Amino acid sequence: QYQKNIYNALLACLVVLSLFLAMKFVSDLRAYGMMGSSNVNTITLSGHGEVSAVPDIANVYFTIQKEAKTVKEAQEQVADIEKQALDSLKGNGVEAKDIKTSNASFYPKYEYQYETRSMMPCNEFGCPPRPGKDVISGYTAQESITVKVRNTDNVGKIMQDLGTLGVSELSGPNFTIDNEDALQAQARKEAIDDAKVKAKILAGDLGVRLGRVVTFSEGGYYPMPMYAKAEVGMGGDVASAPAEIPKGENTITSDVTITYEIR
């Protein structure tokens, strides 16, 4: 009789558990069916997150441009300035892997030359144009180089040294963060947490429960980093580049929008 009672009790528990699981399965199945329905009730909340950090990379850009009678002469002059620039960068602690040529080109320089034959006489309507044509008078060689400076405290001196070497254009520094992906992930998490807190508060005020996430979208703001510019003339005189350039902070933000199913 004792074993029979135990058996009946277990059977009753099994029946109750089966009914509970069946009801839950039907409820979940109905919820899944509602996900694609226009009748599902939802709430939409937005969240904001931002992370600030001091830039740890500075990009500097410069161009070497020379003119000569032949392509070879123009390229040799560019190569001479380039060697001096590379030696200067190496002396300031910049590694070869952080120096990249972004463009190298040469092109002819034209000059209009008039024909030597005598001009046609002028008349009451004016003088006819003197015939002539464009001829090549020389060549211009140009090379553009991008430098990544990892020691940002040294960027002012690097620019000053480059400015004395006869480069044609010198611009920067463009301060950035080397590992922006990690900061963006951190800002996104803060934005999601912000939206979750708002959703829970709103659900409590409405007397409903939050369900699954129906939709999610993100928009981020990557601010233009601090950008200073030093102009260099053809003579190689640099316009007062400071020895120390303030880096400030870069701020990376994330704005998310989350739509929750409510029950």
Image (cartoon, grey):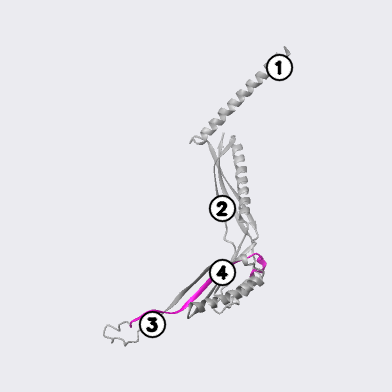
State whether residue 86 is above or below residue 15.
Answer: below
Q: Earlier in the sequence, mark 4 or mark 1?
A: 1
Q: Secondary structure at mark 3?
A: strand
Give residue 35's position: percent from left, percent from top: 52, 36
In the rendered image, which residue does mark 2 sit on? Answer: 220
| Separation of marks 1 and 3 at Cα, in angstroms | 116 Å
Nearest the camera: 119 or 41? 119
Q: Nearer the viewer, mark 2 or mark 3?
A: 3
Tell which residue pokes out farthest to the top in this image.
Answer: 1
Residue at 59% x, 62% y is 225
| Separation of marks 1 and 2 at Cα, in angstroms | 63 Å
**Which quarter of the figure is the C terminus placed in?**
top right
Q: Amino acid at mark 2?
A: Gly
Q: Main secondary structure of the magenta part?
A: strand
State whether residue 172 is above or below residue 19.
Answer: below
Badge 2: few (under 14), some or many (20 or more) residues near its Cα, within 10 Å? some
Residue 48 - label: none
In the rendered image, which residue does mark 4 sit on? Answer: 145
Q: Amino acid at mark 3?
A: Gln
Q: Which residues are magenta?
A: 130-155
Residue 80: name its quadrant. Answer: bottom right
Viewer can see residue 241 = no
| Separation of marks 4 and 3 at Cα, in angstroms | 35 Å
In the rendered image, which residue does mark 3 sit on? Answer: 113
